[in-house]
Image: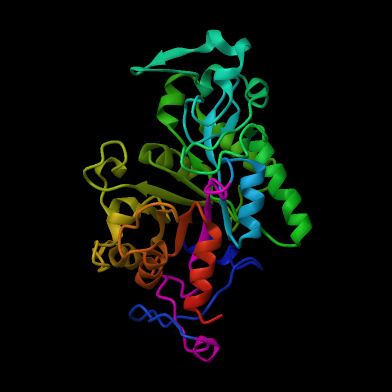
């Protein structure tokens, strides 16, 4: 994601120089900072991307989660985007609502319970944006703090962009965003194509422009290919691995992805083995000019390598990832700072 890397060089980002060599060893103190070299494609420090906000500590996709992420040192905010019945983009990870909102406790919506693909639930596409904004958000992981449930409303993408603009005024800085368009093919089949809604929302804020601090991501290669001629923004192909149906980039090779995308949002196991060694995927992506943003680092889950999440972060940073999606931005920012000797 070469163009956006420049746009991300904002006051929120702590950067360092790199000669593009082998992964550097973690620095031990301030005296080592000047010599420290990141192995990212740009040579700058890897980005801390707030995955649905600071979703490890607040209900995901709420203003509270995003505000906490910024306080904790996140460089980038990530909203997932679904579509409402009236064609508005809604900031939710799942197309259904039972796990992340109070919809089940709302008797006025009892008749919206619908079966789709073998699952009975309340679905985003069956509600208008105005109705969805009356719902309140809940923590989706049962083992995380439930004390902030039912306090914050569901957001539209416009609400999210308004929040970002307000925060930029407060911090006198630019806050990059990395929206993920969820299930665009499903919505398009229902007559709710998210592509024009996304472009309209970005153009209304002069964000559909070269160098704007926006990366658009999706698991759907056809959507990104349709989007490519409509925007100069960075595009990221999400990828879980070759054996993950629906999450395998449509079987496209890295070379084919590089024809329309600027980066890959890769699952951790695509990049790194359990012993911490590289699979070679990142190096091949970098050679093609593709940045790598890896997902998802969670401080309260078993790491893919090492014994702690700090071990996992050090391994990923040392490998040379260009950004890390994390539910816990404070942890990711702290490990990054320690490695740079700050």
Reply yes or no: does residue 32 show up in magenta.
yes
Query: Which of the pair 3/20 is nearer the observer?
Result: 20
Q: Residue at x 57, y 56 (%)?
A: 76
Furthest-top residue in view?
111
- Quarter of the image for residue 243 reads top left
Looking at the rendering, the stretch of residues picked out in magenta corresponds to 29-57
Query: Which of the pair 108/206 is nearer the observer?
Result: 108
Q: Is residue 334 left or right of residue 243?
A: right
Q: Quadrant of the image for the C terminus?
A: bottom right
Q: Position of residue 117 (x, y in %)?
A: 34, 18
Q: Residue at x 65, y 20 (%)?
A: 131
The correct choice, above or below, for 237 with respect to 278 in the image is: above
> Visible in this render: residue 85?
no
Q: Position of residue 97 (x, y in %)?
A: 51, 25
Q: Residue at x 33, y 17 (%)?
A: 118
Furthest-left residue in view?
243
Furthest-bottom residue in view?
31
Q: Position of residue 295 (x, y in %)?
A: 40, 53
The correct choice, above or below, for 114 with respect to 242 in the image is: above
Query: Which of the pair 213/335 is nearer the observer?
Result: 335
Reply yes or no: does residue 145 show up in magenta.
no
Q: Position of residue 329 (x, y in %)?
A: 54, 58
Q: Residue at x 25, y 51 (%)?
A: 253
């Amino acid at each position: 994601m070469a163009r956006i890397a420049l746009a991300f060089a904002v006051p929120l980002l702590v950067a360092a120089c790199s000669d593009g060599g082998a992964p550097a060893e973690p620095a031990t103190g301030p005296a080592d900072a000047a010599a420290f070299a990141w192995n990212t494609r740009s040579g700058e420090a890897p980005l801390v991307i707030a995955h649905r906000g600071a979703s490890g500590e607040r209900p995901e996709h709420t203003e509270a989660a995003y505000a906490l992420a910024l306080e904790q040192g996140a460089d980038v905010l990530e909203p997932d985007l679904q579509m409402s019945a009236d064609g508005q983009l809604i900031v939710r990870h799942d197309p259904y609502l039972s796990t992340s909102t109070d919809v089940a406790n709302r008797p006025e919506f009892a008749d919206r319970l619908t079966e789709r693909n073998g699952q009975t639930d309340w679905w985003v596409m069956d509600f208008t944006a105005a109705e969805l904004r009356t719902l309140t958000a809940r923590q989706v992981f049962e083992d995380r703090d439930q004390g902030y449930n039912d306090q914050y409303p569901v957001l539209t993408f416009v609400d999210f962009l308004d929040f970002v603009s307000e925060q930029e005024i407060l911090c006198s800085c630019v806050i990059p965003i990395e929206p993920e368009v969820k299930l665009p093919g499903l919505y398009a089949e229902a007559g709710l194509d998210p592509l024009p809604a996304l472009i309209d929302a970005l153009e209304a804020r002069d964000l559909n422009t070269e160098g704007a601090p926006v990366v658009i991501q999706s698991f759907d290669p056809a959507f990104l290919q349709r989007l490519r001629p409509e925007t100069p923004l960075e595009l990221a192909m999400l990828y879980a691995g070759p054996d993950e149906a629906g999450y395998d980039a449509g079987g496209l090779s890295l070379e084919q992805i590089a024809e329309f995308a600027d980066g890959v949002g890769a699952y951790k196991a695509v990049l790194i083995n359990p012993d911490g060694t590289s699979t070679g995927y990142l190096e091949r992506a970098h050679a093609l000019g593709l940045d790598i943003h890896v997902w998802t680092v969670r401080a309260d889950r078993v790491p893919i390598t090492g014994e702690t999440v700090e071990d996992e972060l050090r391994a990923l940073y040392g490998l040379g990832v260009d950004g890390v999606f994390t539910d816990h931005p404070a942890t990711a920012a702290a490990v990054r700072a320690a490695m740079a000797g700050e």
